[in-house]
Amino acid sequence: MTNLRIGVMYDRDWAPEGLPDFARQAEALGADDLWVVEDLRWNGGVSAAAVALGATRRLRVGIGIAPAPLRSPALLAMELATLARVFPGRLVAGIGHGVREWMEQVGVAPRSPLALLEETITAVRALLHGERVTSEGREVRIDDIRLVHPPAEPPPLVAGVVRPRSLELSGRVADGTLIAEGHGPRDLENIRALLAKGGAGEDHTLSVFAFCNVGDDPEEVARTLHPHTEGHGAWLGRPQEDVFTVSGSAAQAAGRIGALRASGADTVVLRFVGPEPLRQLEAVLEVAER
């Protein structure tokens, strides 16, 4: 079993000016990753990743996720190449469908989300590897483009997806898959099977976001998590009690991280709720096995 990476999400509701100091402190505590979020109306994922990378020395930074409809593949490849050249080996680029309603709000909802995601990942990967790209796909059209400064070490491209056909697509074209909050060990076993059906090999990574609250009072932990698990359960289409969280005492939280690892997670990214997220992170990292 490979070493587990434990990361922390910089929540979209936290002010962007707090990101540099948060990233430095997370690095000092021993976190492996910091993941930034790109949701419509909140923060830009590429710019946030640049801020976090520039503020730290070792931390790997993930973009979770860049919505394919909002991004020209050529421009996205240019942005990622710049970061990968300046901060080699420290970037993970997540790409996803984007929330359909949000994409409609800004007039970029594709005719075929599946085709757009597959064609985007394929084109971005080729460009990052220094290839000359011409594509006349269903959604992506590129005519004879090659990056002048491709990175020597292209960042892994991971697909942030949920549904079965999208998971198969990820297994076929992405380097890894990013799973949204609320998915537990049993979900990961099914997800791994769908990725394998799409063609994923043993080197296809699985990163999992998880709501996290660390505390010794079970009732207070439940109250703190409630609004998050309630809303997310509705989005996932499952009862609130079936929304998986990393929660409880530090030892209990570490045990739930271990359960995700045993079910195939390579990286667990903690989305802290409640006060003092860095204190909670420190408590988990002190006892979690990696």
Image (spheres, rainbow, N blue to C red):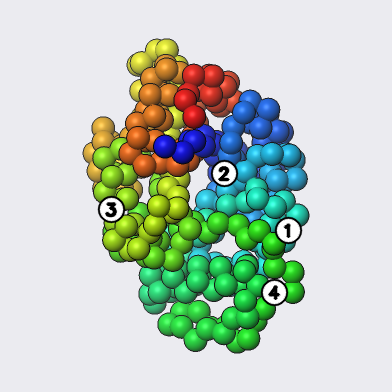
The first of marks 3 and 2 along the sequence is: 2
User: What is the secondary structure assignment of the residue under circle 4?
Assistant: loop
Disc 3 on helix, strand or loop?
Answer: helix
Q: Earlier in the sequence, mark 1 or mark 2?
A: 2
Res. 229 visible in picture: no
| Amino acid type, residue under disc 3 in the picture | Ala
**Which tag is nearer the camera, tag 1 or tag 2?**
1
CA gap between label 3 and label 2 equals 25 Å
Q: Is residue 79 above or below residue 186?
A: below
Q: CA distance from mark 4 to mark 3?
A: 35 Å
Residue, disc 2: 35
| Residue under the image location 39 percent in, 65 percent down | 172
Give neighbour class at mark 1: few <14, some 14-19, many 20+ (Cα, 10 Å). Answer: some
Counting residues from the start of the chain, the first of labels 4 and 3 encountered is 4
* Marks 1/2: CA–CA distance: 19 Å
Label 2 or label 4, whichever lies nearer to me, is: 4
- Label 3 or label 2, whichever lies nearer to me, is 3
Name the residue carrying label 4: 147
Disc 4 packing (10 Å; few <14; some 14–19; many ≥20): some
Residue at 70 percent across and 33 percent down: it is 24
Q: Nearer the viewer, residue 212 or 191?
A: 191
- The amino acid on which the numbered mark 2 sits, given as a three-letter code, is Trp
Task: Say which quarter of the image contains residue 242.
Answer: top left
**Which one is earlier in the sequence, the residue at label 2 or at label 4?**
2
Measure the C-alpha gap from mark 3 to mark 1.
Answer: 34 Å
Residue type, mark 1 in image = Arg
Residue 176: x %, y % from top left: 46, 54
Q: Nearer the viewer, residue 250 or 279?
A: 250
Which numbered disc flags the more N-terminal residue, 1 or 4?
Answer: 1
| Mark 1, residue position | 85
Q: Which mark is residue 193?
A: 3
Amino acid type, callout 4: Leu
